[in-house]
Image: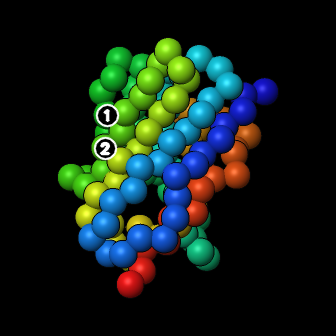
């Protein structure tokens, strides 16, 4: 079973930046995604990097977030800039579409 470990979350002020990391136990040369779940809400799609490297973003983060990967080291990253309070959530990585198994996620809190 694939293991997914997210890290890099924390408390940041509005307008700030964070870089999340995702370590995957298997080869990530496949469609991968970032997702988030805000308190009291359903988990939602945030970003995707396809096998061919093409990226796609939810409208709410477009222009502020970028996604990248290090295939050799089975790592994926989410660079988040100009963070807003509504970005507060626990962030998860997974395949896209996602597998049933999820990691623990990493908590991002945007607050002054």
Q: Which residue is mark 2?
A: 66
User: Which quadrant would residue 91 be assigned to in this image?
Assistant: bottom right
Label 1 vs 2, first from the N-terminus: 1
Image position of 56 with respect to 14: above or below: above
User: Which quadrant would residue 48 be assigned to in this image?
Assistant: top left
* Mark 1 crowd level (few <14, some 14–19, many ≥20, 10 Å Cα): some
Q: Residue at x 36, y 75 (%)?
A: 13
Q: Say whether marks 1 and 2 touch (CB < 8 Å).
A: yes
Q: Position of residue 1 (x, y in %)?
A: 78, 27
Q: Position of residue 110 (x, y in %)?
A: 42, 74
Q: Position of residue 78 (x, y in %)?
A: 41, 45
Secondary structure, mark 1, is strand
* Mark 2 crowd level (few <14, some 14–19, many ≥20, 10 Å Cα): some
Q: Residue at x 52, y 29 (%)?
A: 75
Closer to us: 9 or 101:
9
Q: How many marks?
A: 2
Quadrant of the snapshot with the C terminus = bottom left
Closer to us: 21 or 49:
21
Q: Which residue is mark 1?
A: 55
Residue furthest to the right: 1
């Amino acid at each position: 079973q694939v293991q997914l470990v997210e890290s890099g979350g924390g408390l940041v002020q509005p307008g700030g930046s964070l870089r999340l990391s995702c370590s995957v136990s298997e080869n990530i040369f496949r469609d991968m995604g970032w997702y988030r779940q805000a308190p009291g809400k359903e988990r939602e799609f945030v970003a995707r990097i396809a096998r061919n490297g093409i990226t796609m973003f939810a409208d709410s983060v477009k222009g502020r977030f970028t996604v990248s990967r290090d295939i050799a080291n089975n790592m994926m990253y989410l660079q988040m800039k100009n963070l807003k309070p509504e970005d507060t959530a626990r962030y998860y990585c997974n395949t896209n579409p996602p597998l049933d198994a999820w990691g623990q996620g990493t908590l991002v809190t945007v607050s002054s």
